[in-house]
Image (cartoon, grey):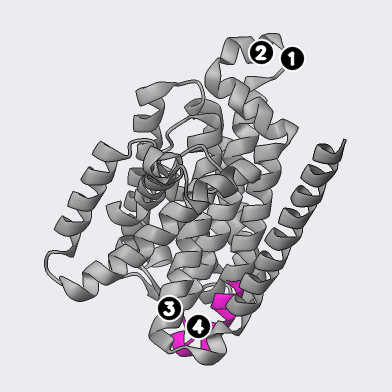
């Protein structure tokens, strides 16, 4: 009884420590725009964007186990919807951002019907077709999207940086909370069951097709939302800014590096690779992509399950926190 009482006290103390740490981190993130340079603020903003982007990918690519190479299409659709509404229809910023996420969610619901009739590599290849489709539409519908040259927003990037930062911070926190609820709740349990054995999950009363479609729509909602905020900050959109290979495949790579299918993996992977990319770009301007690729290859060879599942880090803070939550 004494042992159990001590264990309960320790667990309660740990929960308080985690809560206070989270509040302290949030406080620091809230005051960062007041004390850092515009360059540092931009890097942190990009980190928020890719953390959210990767978390949203992980819902389908990790929890459900379907490698969705076309997840970047939802990011791009949210961005393009936002820009078109602001420039062509003169809608206010906030409703346009929300409509970007709505457009991505509806699109995900529509394409999930044919896509989820496929599995494995066939699903992944078919999902990549979404990127190709949107890329061709963005280029050919130049009267609407600006074509290859894109569209310039009428909002100066300097004026948008701080509102975009706080918007990205709120969306990132919302996505983390949503991911945690899914990870620990019945919805996540259903996704894990489908990932392990779809037929067995169906025998236990899970409707695989329904859960697949819902997971795709939830993932698309966050991708479209953060895509709109991303373009709001950078001030310009064209196929190379939101539909390039490096942007489209970024959440896949970041989730793999951090630990796909885990709760903390996408956060760690996106944060580490965003900082790494920035360092490599500033130090090796002409070879940063090559260096970046070599590092990813090494991670894949020596830590194939991701950073948070690496045996070399099993005694570290990351894996311990993963087990706690």
> Which residue position holds label 2?
202
**Contact check, label 2 and label 4, Cβ < 8 Å:** no
Label 4: how many Cα within 10 Å (few below 14, some 14–19, many 20+): many
Q: Residue furthest left?
A: 286
Element carrying mark 3: helix
> Which residue position holds label 3?
42
Q: Residue at x 39, y 36 (%)?
A: 305
> Which residue position holds label 4?
161
Q: Residue at x 70, y 70 (%)?
A: 23
Q: Residue at x 54, y 56 (%)?
A: 224
Mark on residue 191? none
Query: Residue 270, how many percent across, how many down?
Result: 43, 56
**Contact check, label 1 and label 2, Cβ < 8 Å:** yes
Q: Nearer the viewer, residue 87 or 325?
A: 325
- Magenta residues (range): 153-167
Sequence-wise first label, 3 or 4: 3
Real-space Cα separation, disc 2 to disc 4, in angstroms:
47 Å
Front tag of 3 and 4: 3
> Which residue position holds label 1?
205
């Amino acid at each position: 009884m004494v042992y159990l009482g001590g264990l309960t006290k320790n667990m309660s103390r740990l929960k308080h420590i985690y809560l206070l740490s989270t509040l302290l981190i949030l406080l620091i993130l809230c005051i960062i725009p007041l004390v850092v340079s515009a360059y540092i603020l931009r890097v942190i903003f990009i980190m928020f964007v890719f953390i959210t982007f990767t978390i949203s990918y992980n819902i389908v690519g990790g929890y459900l186990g379907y490698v969705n190479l076309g997840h970047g299409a939802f990011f791009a659709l949210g961005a393009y919807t936002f820009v078109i509404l602001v420039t062509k229809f003169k809608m206010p910023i906030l409703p346009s951002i929300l409509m970007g996420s709505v457009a991505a969610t509806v699109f995900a619901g529509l394409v999930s019907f044919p896509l989820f009739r496929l599995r494995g590599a066939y699903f992944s290849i078919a999902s990549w077709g979404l990127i190709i489709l949107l890329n061709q539409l963005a280029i050919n519908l130049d009267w609407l999207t600006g074509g290859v040259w894109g569209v310039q927003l009428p909002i100066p990037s300097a004026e948008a940086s701080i509102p975009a930062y706080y918007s990205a911070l709120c969306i990132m926190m919302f996505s983390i909370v949503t991911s945690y609820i899914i990870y620990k709740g019945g919805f996540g349990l259903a996704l894990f069951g489908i990932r392990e054995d779809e037929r067995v999950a169906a025998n236990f009363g899970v409707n695989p097709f329904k859960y697949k479609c819902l997971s795709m729509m939830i993932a698309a909602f966050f991708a479209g939302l953060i895509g709109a905020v991303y373009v709001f900050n950078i001030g310009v959109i064209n196929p190379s800014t939101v539909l390039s290979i490096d942007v489209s495949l970024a959440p896949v790579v970041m989730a793999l590096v951090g630990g796909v299918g885990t709760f903390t993996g996408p956060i760690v992977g996106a944060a580490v690779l965003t900082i790494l990319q920035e360092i490599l770009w500033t130090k090796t301007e002409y070879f940063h992509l090559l260096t970046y690729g070599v590092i990813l290859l090494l991670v894949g060879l020596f830590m194939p399950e991701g950073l948070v599942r690496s045996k070399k880090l099993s005694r570290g803070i990351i894996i311990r926190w993963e087990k706690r939550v």
